[in-house]
Amino acid sequence: MSSPAFDVIKSKETEAGRREHVLDVALLIFARYGYRKTSMDDVARAADISRPGLYFYFASKQELFRATVTRALDSDVAAAERALADTDRPLRDRLIEAFDHWTGRYVGPLTGEIAIVIESNPDLLGPVTVEYPVRFAGLVTDALTAGAPPDRAGVASDVAQTLLSTAIGIKHQTSSREDFLARMTTGVGLLLLALERTQ
């Protein structure tokens, strides 16, 4: 026999799990149909939840969209941060993995649409579209600064910005995550050589 306190905890975990499931499904639905064409009914059906149940979690489509994008970006930044923090691995490998989490996962047929939906609706997302890229850029800059020779640490910010621009360009030129990773590996390698070069 379970205690009332245990039942409350279990109920909250179940509710959190349902909410996370809805956000996972919503990301795919927004990617498939775009923000304007996606309805709350579409998301409710795909998530196997009633329309009133969906509105219990999210009061509007805009609130659902913001929560969906914020969750995806939180996940991307956290995964990149874990990769960059693993200092037992070479900086090159950590950077490639971080950029794969941040950009590479949005390359390909359906996942590419997710990035387009996010980039096409900055007015719906508010400061989120600026805050997360700044956080990611800071992580990359910090990793490069820590890995640079002392006399080159000041160049780390420039290298980080160049890597960010490189990743964006490659994302728009490739059709698969594998192609993105191959080209990003080349870019990271070249820019790390420039960072390590003595003046």
Image (cartoon, rainbow, N blue to C red):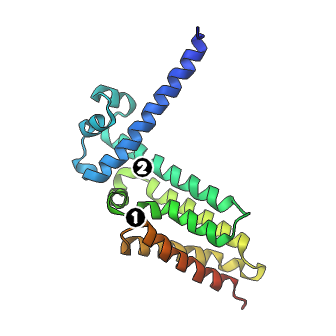
- As drawn, the label of residue 154 is none
Which residue is situated farthest in the front direction here? 178
> Relative to 105, does residue 56 appear above or below in the rendering?
above
- Residue 168 visible to the viewer: no
Q: Quadrant of the N terminus?
A: top right
Which residue is situated farthest in the top direction here? 1
Question: Which image quadrant for residue 95?
Answer: bottom right
Give the number of the mark in front: 2 or 1: 1
196 left or right, relative to 59: right
Near mark 1 (Cα within 10 A), the count class, few <14, some 14-19 or many ≥20, is many
- The amino acid sitting under disc 2 is Val
- Residue 32 visible to the viewer: yes
- Residue wearing tag 1: 107
Q: Residue 2: give x, y in percent of width and height.
A: 58, 11
- Residue wearing tag 2: 69
Which residue is situated farthest in the right direction here? 150
User: Viewer-proximal residue, 130 or 34?
Assistant: 34
- The amino acid sitting under disc 1 is Val
47 left or right, relative to 98: left
Q: Which residue shows up at 43% across the image and 66% down it? A: 177
User: Viewer-proximal residue, 86 or 69?
Assistant: 86
Question: Which image quadrant for residue 122?
Answer: bottom left
Q: Which residue shows up at 47% across the image and 60% down it? A: 130
Query: Marks 2 and 1, Cα distance to the nearest angstrom?
Result: 16 Å
Q: Residue 109: give x, y in percent of width and height.
A: 32, 61
> Relative to 56, does residue 62 appear above or below in the rendering?
below
> Relative to 108, does residue 19 appear above or below in the rendering?
above
Q: Which residue shows up at 42% across the image and 49% down it? A: 69
